[in-house]
Amino acid sequence: MTFSVAKLKEVLKKRAVRIILLLVCALLLLLAAYKVFAGGEKRQTRYVPTEREERLLILLTGIEGVKDAKVMITEEDGVAVAAIIVFEGEDGFLTRVRLIDVAAAALNIERSSVIVFAAES
C-alpha cells in the first residue's frame, strides 16, 4: 500500500480526521506539559538548618506554649539580619512575644526583624 501526497490531502480534507488529529496533538501537548511541570521525578527540597538555627530552635522549643518550631535565619556576610519562625502550639500574643524576644536577643537583631507564624493545625 503506497501513500501518496494526493491521498494524504484527500484524507485531511475530511473534518473528522482533522478534529482527531487536533485532539491527538492537544493530548500530546498536555502530556508534555505535565511531564515538565508536574510529573517526572518528584523533587524533594529539604532545608537543612544551620548550627545557629539549631541552637536557636533549642531555645524556642523551651518556651511555654511552644510544642515544636522551625527557624530560618537570614544572614549577610555571616551576620544575622532577620529570622522567620514557624511554631506549633498555643497561638497567643504572649507566646509570640516570647518567641520574638528570645530570637532577637539570641541573634542580636532588632525585634522587628523577627517574623513569627503559627503552623497550620
Image (spheres, rainbow, N blue to C red):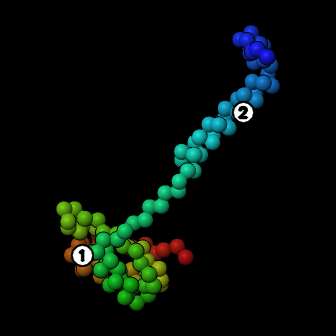
> What number is the disc on residue 1?
none
Residue 110, horizontal then vertical, whole percent? 24, 72
What residue did someone put label 2 on? 23
Q: Dot 1: few (<14), some (14–19), or many (≥20) neighbours within 10 Å?
A: some
Most distant residue in the top direction? 6
Residue 116, horizontal then vertical, whole percent? 39, 73
What residue did someone put label 1 on? 107
Residue 119 located left or right of residue 32: left
The residue lying at 49 percent from left, 57 percent from top is 43
Q: Is residue 100 visible?
A: no
State which quarter of the image contains the N terminus: top right
Three-letter code for the amino acid on which mark 2 is drawn: Leu
Residue 105, horizontal then vertical, whole percent? 24, 80
Residue 98 located left or right of residue 17: left
Residue 12, horizontal then vertical, whole percent? 75, 18
Query: Upstream in the sequence, badge 1 or badge 2?
Result: 2
The residue lying at 22 percent from left, 62 percent from top is 76
Q: Quadrant of residue 69?
A: bottom left
State yes or no: discs 1 and 2 in contact (Cβ < 8 Å).
Answer: no
Per the image, label 2 sits on a secondary structure element best described as helix
State which quarter of the image contains the C terminus: bottom right
Residue 94 located left or right of residue 29: left
Q: Quadrant of residue 62?
A: bottom left
The residue lying at 25 percent from left, 64 percent from top is 75
Per the image, label 1 sits on a secondary structure element best described as helix
Above or below, comparing residue 2 to residue 48 in the picture: above
Q: Is residue 67 visible?
A: yes
Three-letter code for the amino acid on which mark 1 is drawn: Leu
